[in-house]
Image (spheres, grey):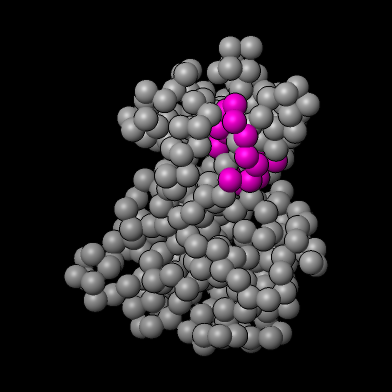
Amino acid sequence: MRVIQFREAICEAMSEEMRLDQSIFLMGEEVAEYNGAYKASKGMLDEFGDKRVIDTPISELGFAGIGVGSTMTGNRPIIEFMTFNFALVGIDQIINNAAKIRQMSGGQFPCPIVFRGPTGSAGQLAATHSQAFESWYANCPGLKVIVPSNPYDAKGLLKSAIRDNDPVIFMESEQMYGDKGEVPEEEYLIPIGKAEVKITGKDVTLVSFGKILKQAQIAVDKLKDEGIEVELIDLRTIRPLDMDTILESVKKTNRLVILEESWPFGNISTEITYQVQNQIFDYLDAPIEKINTADTPAPYSPVLLAEWLPNSDDVIKSIKKVMYK
């Protein structure tokens, strides 16, 4: 099977869907002439032209609103934010229009739109450019939220997101665009709302998603050498959340650790913790551990940033804690 970059998988997903459906277009800052800020739309302007690959001013509220409005006339836009930190400027359109228009119109207007771009930290980008917003958007009924961790999932999930009739928040990472992985040449889709058990194990369940999953995988490999078998689950979709896969795993391992690149208050790991203790409390042999960033804005200093972000050593420590080792 061929190996391609994450950015190429994103580009292929958009291009394949645009060839199939003339109502799909891509809009955002630098998506056309510059081939995308991270080259995720390379070559698309040449193929589809400037009516379907559209450069915008630096006005997220404006082009997010244009995208939402265009769904009401039969289009299926893909709106790229250079980073989801900038999406805060357009969040009114996402939360108050995209997420609610189907209900407010009594079902007359679906809103088939994808908002995509990077989330989380990406090195020395400091406090206002290093924030994870998955839990913000997942808190809003009417939105679906996807955070892939590899090129294969990115392509299959983005194609499903573009075909979905509801608004989808599709979150990537600057630090993943160059990641390489096996991606089939033939068409495939990955269903929204289904987690993947990446590694099976019997001792403890470890749940994560997005680029921080790499730290989880490093920890799992190290612990295997110590005779600890970790079951690693990649959520892939944040909303709808695949609790069934998590619950079945915890019933087997009786222990749960959750790794998430976000602030510790009111996040995805908080919700999972509640759901597990509420539904299968008697299966737990130890309190649930969740691993998050420090409860501060992201620092600029690389030394402080390394302390702020969770890493594989934090995961190993938490897994040994729930195993009383």
Q: How many marks?
A: 0
Front-most of 57 and 17? 17
Relative to 201, residue 42 above or below: below
Relative to 46, residue 320 above or below: above
In the picture, measured across the screen, residue 74 lies left or right of residue 301, that is left
Q: Position of residue 229 (x, y in %)?
A: 66, 29
Q: Which quadrant of the figure has residue 207?
A: top right
Residue shown at 69%/66% (left/top)? 9
Q: Is residue 49 magenta?
A: no
Location of the N terminus by quadrant is bottom right
Front-most of 16 and 121? 16
**Residue range (magenta):** 197-215
Location of the C terminus by quadrant is top right
Residue shown at 63%/46% (left/top)? 198
Q: Position of residue 41 (x, y in %)?
A: 68, 71
Front-most of 120 and 256? 256
Q: Which quadrant of the figure has residue 277?
A: top left
Residue shown at 67%/54% (left/top)? 150
User: Given the current orientation, which residue lies at the most extreme top position?
Assistant: 325
Work out whether residue 169 can be spotted.
Answer: no
Q: Which quadrant of the figure has residue 268?
A: top left
Front-most of 38 and 266? 266
Q: Position of residue 79 (x, y in %)?
A: 52, 67
Work out whether residue 219 can be spotted.
Answer: yes
Relative to 295, residue 272 above or below: below
Residue shown at 41%/64% (left/top)? 167
Q: Position of residue 134 (x, y in %)?
A: 48, 46
